[in-house]
Amino acid sequence: MKRITQKQLAFYKLYKVYRKDHEQYINTWEFLGEVFIEELNRWEMMSYKCPTRLTDLYQENTKLLIRRVIKGKSGASYYQYKLFQPNIEKIEDVSIRVFYQEIHSVIKDYERTKEKILS
């Protein structure tokens, strides 16, 4: 895979959390910093643009994400996001769809190999 976009990184963060806990929301500020993409065996940097791309992802894929407004201890309001039952049909953005297919195929290959070893 070529360069990974900030929007793809936002999706990846949401997808990894979704695989662990379907009900967990992620705060906007958690979309900053370095992230290791296990399936591609590489590190990427989620820049200050990543939360903006997260908003774009939400607006362009309305059936894929859920967003809610939270009021923090300081009184500031911010968004939290989570994926809603992700599947290929819900992903309207082509670059995210291709990225999802690539990540998902690596995960499926790993699970099939694990099953073969355990059986």
Image (spheres, rainbow, N blue to C red):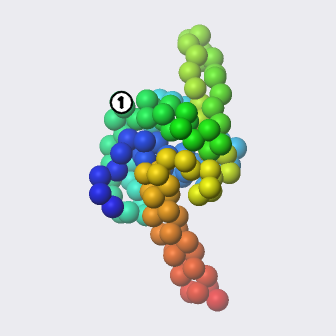
Identify whether 53 is placed above or below 1: above
Q: Nearer the viewer, residue 81 or 98?
A: 98
Residue at x 53% of width, y 38% of height: 60
**How many numbered marks have been drawn onto this rendered protein structure?**
1
Q: Nearer the viewer, residue 32 or 82?
A: 82
Q: Looking at the rendering, in which quadrant would you find the C terminus? A: bottom right
Give the side of residue 44 with respect to residue 106, left or right: left
Q: Name the amino acid type tagged 1.
A: Tyr
Identify whether 86 is placed above or below 75: below
Q: Residue 89 sits in which quadrant? A: bottom right
Residue at x 59% of width, y 31% of height: 80
Q: Position of residue 94 (x, y in %)?
A: 46, 51
Residue at x 29% of width, y 52% of height: 3
Q: In this view, which residue lies farthest toward the left?
A: 3
Residue at x 62% of width, y 38% of height: 62
Q: Position of residue 92 (x, y in %)?
A: 55, 47
Mark 1, Cα crowd under 10 Å, few <14 / some 14-19 / many 20+, is: few
Q: Secondary structure at mark 1?
A: loop
Residue 34 in view of the camera: no
Residue 80 in view of the camera: yes
Identify whether 10 is placed above or below 42: above
Residue occupied by mark 1: 48
